[in-house]
Image (tube, rainbow, N blue to C red):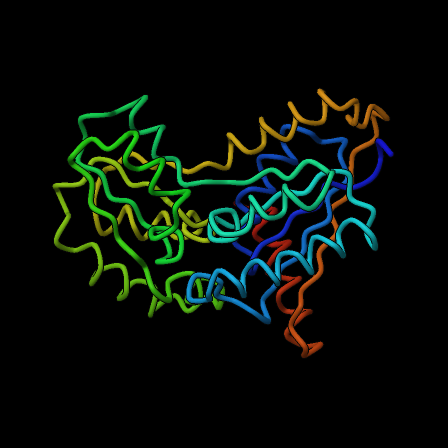
Amino acid sequence: MNNAPIGFLDSGIGGVTVLKPTVELLPCENCFFFGDSANNPYGDKSDKEIIARCDEIVNMLINDKKCKVIVLACNTASAKAVEYLRGNYSLPVIAIEPAYKMVHDLNPGGFTLVMATRGTIESEKFNRLYYKYNNNKTVLLPCAGLADIIEQNRQDELRLYLENLLGDYKGKAENVVLGCTHYPLAKDIIKDVLGEINFFDGAQGVAKRIKSVLEENGLLNGSGVRGTVEFEDSSPDEKTRELKKERFFELLERY
């Protein structure tokens, strides 16, 4: 069981930003990453749709791939489906969330932008977090379509989108919470638009939580052999699946 994979679920390939620090922290662990590109983006879907799809994927990760822990490497899936999944599966389900508490801990007085999907921003889970740590200097920015632009690597469109969204905050914003696992892939352009800012995302925290959960449950892989990473995409077209896989491993290498 200890060499069974950690299962990662995302609406596409953005969750590679969560996988990377996990691989670095736990190099002996095997990982299986499922990108649900056929149903991307999750942020525009109803709670019922997201829960049903996550349930289907988690069932596959447990029963077909024999994963020992499930990681929701998607903020929208975490916000909408984590309670259902934890209530219906006995395996540990680890969820990412927007790193708004990190702002409270590290720069609570700074003018803050929270970039996330509308689904995340409107979720009960995020609102509990937001109102608990609200610094009254925060703007919530629902970024409709941004994850999809990043997913499809439309670079010219990405820059224009971010200039239009963030331009008014140049020189004002101090903190940016990246509330979608796709968004760290656009850090360089966000910084170009806003200037020097502090980025906050939950990926490192998730990696540490995975390690803690594995230790608590006696599931750490102690083989001393470097683990493997497998990737699967839900796109119906084989060529698209191959392109997704190629970009995924490219990002895993250089992110």
Q: Position of residue 122 (x, y in %)?
A: 34, 53
Quadrant (top left, top right, bottom left, bottom right) of the N terminus: top right
Image position of 19 (left or right of 80):
right
Residue at 73% of width from left, 49% of height from top? 32
Image position of 235 (left or right of 39):
right
Quadrant for residue 43, please give it: bottom left
Quadrant for residue 50, please give it: bottom right
Residue at 16% of width from left, 34% of height from top? 136
Image position of 124 (left or right of 160):
right
Q: Position of residue 220 (x, y in %)?
A: 77, 26
Residue 105's place in the image compared with 230, above or below, is: above
Q: Nearer the viewer, residue 8 or 135?
A: 135
Quadrant for residue 217, please give it: top right
Q: Position of residue 234 (x, y in %)?
A: 67, 68
Image position of 236 (left or right of 109):
right
Residue 147's place in the image compared with 227, above or below, is: below
Q: Nearer the viewer, residue 188 or 34?
A: 34
Q: Position of residue 159 (x, y in %)?
A: 30, 62
Q: How many marks?
A: 0
Q: Nearer the viewer, residue 10 or 92?
A: 92
Residue at 30% of width from left, 30% of height from top? 132
